Image (tube, grey):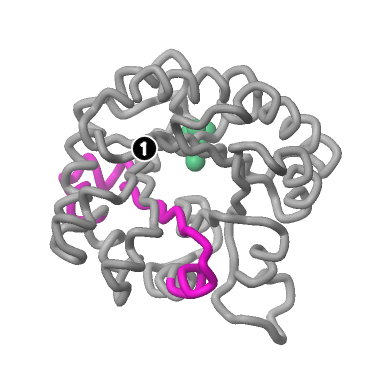
Amino acid sequence: MARRYFIAGNWKMNKTSAEAAVLAKAVAQSVGGVSEVDIAICPTFTSLESAGREIKGTNVKLGAQNMYFEKSGAFTGEISADMLNGAGCEYVILGHSERRQYFKECDCLINKKVKAAVAASLKPILCVGETLEERESGKTIDVVSAQTKGGLDGLSAAEALNVVVAYEPVWAIGTGKTATPAMAQEVHAEIRKVLAGMFGADAAEKIQILYGGSMKPENADELLKQKDIDGGLIGGAALKADSFASLVKSAVALS
Ligand code: PGA
């Protein structure tokens, strides 16, 4: 497979700065030397510096969980792409379903953030995924396609190569319910088709598409073996260094 696996930890609103440093250090010690797959941790804004210090010089990269699209100014409480760059970030998670659900983020806002991230040389991890209600009413592919198109609208093919897409069925996040490998593969293949339509088959073949939603050491192998699943965006299982390391090792074994 030409695409490298990518295992990214989404720490969500967990860990103080000191706690994040401890976890980042443990992650660096266990997988910091792994070169076969891409690895990132995404702590809260307040922990970027402490966690970043612990992984500096290793193969574990730093990501943030959100940002605003403006460069600077009167936007109280917001963080810009340049600030994330300055804090050592390579990635930024955008459009996570929790932001869509609790903070009312729409595709149009997410698209502005994606463009601002790419313009600042940050790699966006664009999250897409359907709710249980949408799945049960047969709308999964429509919803995920619209979110992918809406989120990446206006990017060139060259810019799209710096984007990672994460398919995260909302009903599988933090619930212990995982999409079956076949269910996930079906959606991943559709996302790749959408990407091919937008950016050409060549670019689409190169873009990493991660699965997220209760991925853990016990189910990772079967998911990662699917043709269009290029890694995982990991929530709960990323909060312990040993389970995160085990996911990285599953990806290494399949590389
Ligand atoms: P989970 O979260 O692994 O805890 O389900 C994944 C995510 O929301 O990114």
Say left or right for 246 vs 53. left
Q: Which residues are magenta?
A: 115-143
Classify 145 as above or below 211.
below
The residue located at (78%, 45%) in the rendering is 53
The image quadrant of residue 109 is bottom left
Q: Residue furthest right?
A: 18
Q: Toward the viewer: 168 or 37?
A: 37
The image quadrant of residue 209 is top left
Q: Position of residue 215 (x, y in %)?
A: 44, 27
The image quadrant of residue 237 is top right
The residue located at (51%, 54%) in the rendering is 93
Classify 15 as above or below 110.
above
Q: Position of residue 69 (x, y in %)?
A: 54, 76
Can residue 117 be found in the magenta stretch?
yes
Classify 11 as above or below 160.
above
Classify 158 as above or below 12.
below
Mark 1 residue element: loop
Q: Which residue position holds label 1? A: 4
Q: Residue furthest bottom?
A: 73
Q: Toward the viewer: 8 or 105?
A: 8
Say left or right for 173 vs 91. left
The residue located at (59%, 53%) in the rendering is 65
Q: Toward the viewer: 206 or 134?
A: 206
